[in-house]
């Protein structure tokens, strides 16, 4: 049996995530008060088919939000029961949340006559801090469309867990800011930049021309070796800290060339050593949605 708890700010894509898990065979329960979590888990455990089933539970501020601060205690209860579970928290920039509510014309659960939308979003972030702090996986959905979020939930959460940590290498552009979900961030802006070659400017770090350019730069190879050696040295210590997931973000100026190249190479290298290594290129996804 595996239990996935989905939480996050309103408008971040929780319903999409739950639907993706349901499509993957999970039994889905939305809007469960935190205080009822232990009772539900106890009922699940005594069910004769429970060990062969997966469950996804949505918890947010729509009901009994006063209980959210006891969420860390509930997590301790699950750990004591030796129940395999994953806590996923979805977040997004306030500007994007406001845009989504404006487009759908939905009412934020905490907004009202004396609290406008921005205040409601700020209040919700404060209320959900205990859940975000307890999360195994934090996903920033600001630049994700529905299809991309569903794919990410499928690969990061829904597929059967393997032994060891799930590792995600994510490229990004510093001009758009670092990812909110990054555990480690490396800065590749000091490396030679293919952008200044007109023939390479429109290519990415996945294209042959850029790969050949960066393969021939000693500084690029030195940074690759340094990151590879650092991660190889510290994997076991991150795992020993009961980590199930880790996100390594690598950024360059625009997130098109150097960071993409390094993430691809690192994913290829560590896939030969670890069971669950993924790669995501934030700015390339961003361009696909524009």
Image (tube, rainbow, N blue to C red):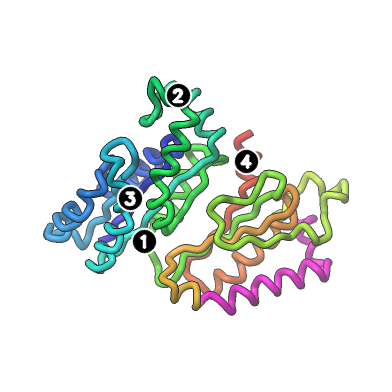
Q: Is residue 180 left or right of residue 6?
A: right
Identify the disc placed on residue 286: 4
- Near mark 2 (Cα within 10 A), the count class, few <14, some 14-19 or many ≥20, is few
Residue indicated by mark 1? 160
Dot 3: few (<14), some (14–19), or many (≥20) neighbours within 10 Å? some
Q: Is residue 189 left or right of residue 4?
A: right
Q: What is the magenta range?
A: 208-235
Label 3 with label 2: CB-CB less than 8 Å: no
Residue at the disc numbered 3? 69
Which numbered mark, 1 or 4, is in the foreground of this view? Answer: 4
Residue 63 as seen in the image, left or right of residue 258: left
- Spatial separation of the CA atoms under disc 1 and disc 4: 28 Å
Residues at marks 1 and 4 touching, judged by CB atoms closer than 8 Å = no
Spatial separation of the CA atoms under disc 3 and disc 2: 30 Å
Report if the CB atoms under discs 4 and 2 are less than 8 Å apart. no
Q: Which residue is mark 2?
A: 104
C-alpha separation, residue under disc 4 versus residue under disc 3: 35 Å
Residue 290 coordinates in the image, percent (x, y): 64, 33
Q: Which class describes the residues within 10 Å of circle 4: few (<14), some (14-19), or many (20+)?
A: few
Query: Are the residues tagged 3 and 1 within 8 Å (C-beta)?
Result: no
């Amino acid at each position: 049996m595996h239990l996935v708890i989905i939480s996050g700010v309103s408008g971040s894509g929780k319903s999409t995530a739950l639907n993706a898990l349901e499509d993957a065979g999970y039994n889905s329960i939305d809007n469960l008060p935190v205080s009822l979590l232990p009772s539900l888990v106890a009922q699940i455990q005594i069910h004769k088919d429970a060990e062969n089933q997966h469950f996804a539970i949505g918890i947010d501020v729509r009901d009994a939000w006063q209980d959210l601060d006891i969420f860390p205690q509930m997590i301790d209860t699950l750990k004591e029961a030796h129940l395999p579970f994953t806590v996923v928290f979805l977040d997004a920039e306030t500007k994007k949340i406001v845009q989504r509510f404006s487009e759908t014309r939905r009412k934020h659960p905490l907004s009202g006559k004396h609290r406008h939308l921005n205040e409601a979003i700020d209040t919700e972030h404060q209320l959900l801090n205990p859940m975000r702090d307890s999360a195994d996986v934090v996903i920033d959905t600001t630049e994700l469309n529905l299809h991309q979020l569903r794919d990410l939930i499928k690969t990061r959460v829904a597929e059967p867990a393997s032994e060891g940590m799930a590792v995600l290498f994510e490229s990004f552009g510093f001009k758009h800011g670092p990812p909110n979900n990054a555990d480690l961030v490396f800065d590749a802006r000091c490396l030679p930049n293919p952008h200044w070659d007109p023939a390479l400017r429109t290519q990415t770090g996945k294209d042959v021309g850029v790969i050949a350019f960066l393969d021939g730069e000693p500084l690029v190879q030195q940074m690759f070796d340094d990151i590879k050696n650092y991660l190889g040295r510290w994997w076991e210590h991150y795992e020993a800290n009961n980590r199930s997931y880790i996100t390594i973000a690598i950024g360059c100026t625009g997130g098109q060339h150097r960071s993409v190249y390094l993430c691809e190479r690192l994913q290829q290298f560590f896939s030969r050593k670890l069971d669950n290594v993924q790669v995501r290129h934030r700015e390339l996804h961003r361009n696909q949605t524009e």
